[in-house]
């Protein structure tokens, strides 16, 4: 190979097979894509060891992508269910799966997942550190963390969340600024705990260059974690969140100097009126690196429905330029999601991404809406199901009640506006007497 | 009584008991409310014959309200289920219920609904005309329609949708402009059919003054129907939609001259990037009359999930100034909703309204979010359920899996970020070895 990473190739004007695949999928010129990869505005997370990968691009001008979180936790350790979630994500053409397993030795599952998945895979190595190393948090040495990262990289993980922005400067802010919900990032809380218990600097910050070397070697994409993301609408856009974003902007530049691809993670919980400004701020402070948002959830009071609160926030974020949406399921804040939750989360997130692609004018995004609405005008339900984001649910709903007349549904029956208007525009009369029409 | 309608009272600086009730609920000065009712920016739909009504205000500066549609159709005529839906709407504190029954003689149901409902009731008289009059559409005389309106008014209906904007000028536009999904308003399609079959002017337009007289007598609020609302994202903000809006602006002024309260109905299907402009346009063209949006649905391709597509659109619309959201259920475009669909629709719509109230700075809107997030920081699940928009679902989700440690959930287990951060901030160490903490 004549290059290390996709970014390195782009800087050297080498067109990779991954770039060709992405350019074809997105229907854009490969030269345009190459320019944007070279300057960091687009990434193709594609670990050289992930042989089953069907590469996807994330960034400016491309379709909004979505990520599906899964993985076992201490009280839910059924790997079979987690693998089913992965299959669902693949079936729904999600761009990414993050394995967030945070208990025990998760290597076997992760390796099986990578081997079978055409979808890019992300991890958060610190979740796995305690289990992987067999050490308690406090006993882990800074260099131990690098060992975990190297193991994930070697296994073929395409992107990793690294909370390198939570350095001592930020810890000072945490103690000075105060906020309602402190740290709600799992990785961020572990690093904060480690720093406080050991008195040392954030190991991912201190050894950032070493992390970058590993990333560059395998072409792992850096996903800069937002350890200080707001966990309530009270905390959004505060000094801690924005302070960390400034750090992430600097870390973005340092990664690019080593040709490591980067995306930046973002909020979180946030009132709707702050979202546009946050996207502008991230794009400016992080030099147009792709923005990966976790929500944002636009009100705190809807546990059980956070797929909806985040669909609202995610759609607005993506319309204003966020590139990558992390799905949220109805189980958020309550339990590890089951397979139905995962499906609900995927669909809600796909709706948000697609609605945003329409709003931001991604070429071709409206085509399927046009086909759907054309089928609606024809009152052709079978055709509508074909274009539905979830054909099975649409058909099940329709079929659940019996209609007395073809080309109607039980909502309006023979008073269907489409049917009435079609008949009149065809020059026919319409009658509702004894439910017979003059058609 | 010294006044005819709430608007008439406001213009004469008479404070009604309904104004006092609304001012108290919204925590605003009654003088401010009175001013805004007088100029049409706020309405209190309160038919003098609706004796069980607990009045609500809709308009500038007030909390965003939601409406629940229900009613029987030809293929689903179970009044017991429809009454259960009404009870659900009341239990969830929805501001309004529209009875859209469109088949047979619906008087008994409507009267029972009004008698038992503290929630304002709306109807669309033309849906009921064929059944009420026992005539086929074509045979109905313009004055017959007034008879139906009078019957609804006398029964205590608080607001009625009147599609008076679809006049002959608009029919010319329909034929000239063309669009993908023509007329998707049920009432609009019936009027269009009637006009085309009889060759006459829209009866609600031609006899608008007579309609206003009835409305003024009972204090029925005029809900100006958008017969030409877009039924696909292809059709939004087109000549027909905006042309009709200009008519509705004129009809608004004519109603105000007779002291009839008015709101204006709006889209429909619409890409996210058009919503803000549409609100601005409606407010300008309709002289700041309250805006009642039906969605908007931000993509056409999600049948089965249109509670989500409309939660996205509704939240954005309300953030930009829409005052009243018509809920949409997962059954939209597919079937008459069942009770579960209604619940899903109500919750999604409440989320949209609440998120918008936070974003537009309605005083006090954030208070409950603060309480929820405070409970989250304390990892106090029982307290969280209290503040949840749907406590039952939240608790059911949480209880569905067993946690091995108190104050955690199965998502993160003992790696809960809140728990870790709390311990460290309290100056304690944290350990994950053998799952024991040093607390």
Image (tube, coloured by chain):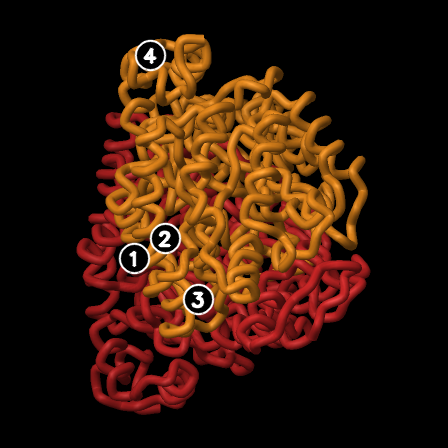
Chain colours: A red, B orange
Q: Is residue A113 visible?
A: yes
Q: In the image, is A28 to the left or to the right of A194?
A: left
Residue marked by disc 4: B30
Give the x, y percent position of residue A83: 67, 64
Count of residue discs? 4
Alpha carbon separation for disc pair 4 and 3? 49 Å
- Pinpoint the chain carrying mark 3: A
Give the x, y percent position of residue B104: 75, 46
Residue marked by disc 2: A316
Q: Which mark is residue B371?
A: none
- Pinpoint the chain carrying mark 1: A
Image position of B19 with respect to A335: above or below: above
How dense is the environment of label 3, judged by Cα within 10 Å: few (below 14), some, or many (20 and up)? Answer: many
Classify the position of the N terminus of chain A by image quarter.
bottom left
Alpha carbon separation for disc pair 1 and 3? 14 Å
Name which quarter of the figure residue A255 lies in: bottom left
Q: Secondary structure at mark 1?
A: loop
Same chain for the residues at labels 2 and 3, yes or no?
yes
Alpha carbon separation for disc pair 2 and 1? 6 Å
Alpha carbon separation for disc pair 1 and 4? 39 Å
């Amino acid at each position: 190979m004549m290059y290390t990473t996709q970014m390195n190739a782009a800087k050297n004007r080498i067109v990779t097979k991954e770039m060709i695949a992405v350019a074809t999928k997105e229907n854009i010129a490969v030269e345009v894509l190459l320019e944007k990869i070279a300057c960091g505005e687009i990434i193709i997370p594609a670990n050289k060891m992930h042989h089953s990968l069907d590469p996807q691009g994330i960034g400016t001008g491309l379709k909004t992508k979505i990520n599906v979180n899964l993985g076992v936790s201490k009280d839910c350790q059924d790997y079979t269910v987690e693998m089913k979630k992965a299959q669902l994500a693949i079936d729904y053409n999600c761009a990414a799966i993050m394995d967030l397993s945070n208990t025990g030795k998760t290597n076997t599952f992760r390796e099986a997942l990578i081997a079978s998945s055409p979808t890019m895979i992300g991890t958060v190595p610190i979740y796995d550190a305690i289990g992987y190393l067999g050490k308690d948090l406090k006993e882990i040495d800074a260099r131990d963390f690098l060992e975990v990262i190297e193991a994930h990289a070697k296994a073929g993980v395409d992107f990793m969340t690294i909370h390198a922005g939570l350095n001592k400067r930020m810890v000072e802010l945490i103690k000075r600024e105060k906020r309602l919900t402190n740290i709600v990032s799992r990785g961020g809380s572990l690093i904060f705990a480690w720093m406080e218990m050991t008195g040392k600097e954030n190991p991912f910050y201190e050894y950032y260059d070493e992390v970058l070397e590993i990333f560059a070697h395998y072409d792992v994409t850096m996903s800069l974690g937002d350890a200080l993301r707001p966990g309530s609408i009270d905390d959004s856009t505060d000094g801690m969140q924005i302070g960390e974003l400034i750090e992430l902007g600097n870390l973005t530049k340092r990664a690019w100097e080593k040709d490591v691809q980067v995306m930046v993670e973002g909020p979180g919980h946030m009132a709707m009126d702050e979202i546009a400004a946050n996207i502008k701020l991230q794009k400016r402070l992080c030099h147009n690196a792709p923005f990966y948002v976790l929500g944002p959830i636009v009100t705190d009071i809807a546990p059980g429905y956070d797929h909806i609160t985040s669909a609202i926030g995610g759609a607005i974020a993506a319309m204003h330029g966020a590139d990558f949406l992390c799905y949220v399921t109805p189980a958020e804040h309550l339990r590890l999601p089951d397979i139905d939750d995962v499906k609900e989360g995927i669909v809600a997130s796909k709706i948000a991404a697609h609605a945003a692609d329409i709003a931001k004018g991604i070429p071709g995004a409206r085509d399927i809406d046009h086909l759907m609405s054309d089928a609606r005008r024809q009152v052709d339900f079978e055709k509508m199901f074909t274009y539905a984001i979830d054909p099975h649910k649409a058909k099940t709903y329709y079929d659940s009640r019996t209609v007395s007349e073809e080309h109607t549904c039980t909502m309006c029956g023979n008073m269907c506006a489409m049917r009435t208007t079609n008949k009149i525009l065809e020059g026919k009369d319409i009658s509702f007497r004894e439910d017979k029409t003059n058609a």
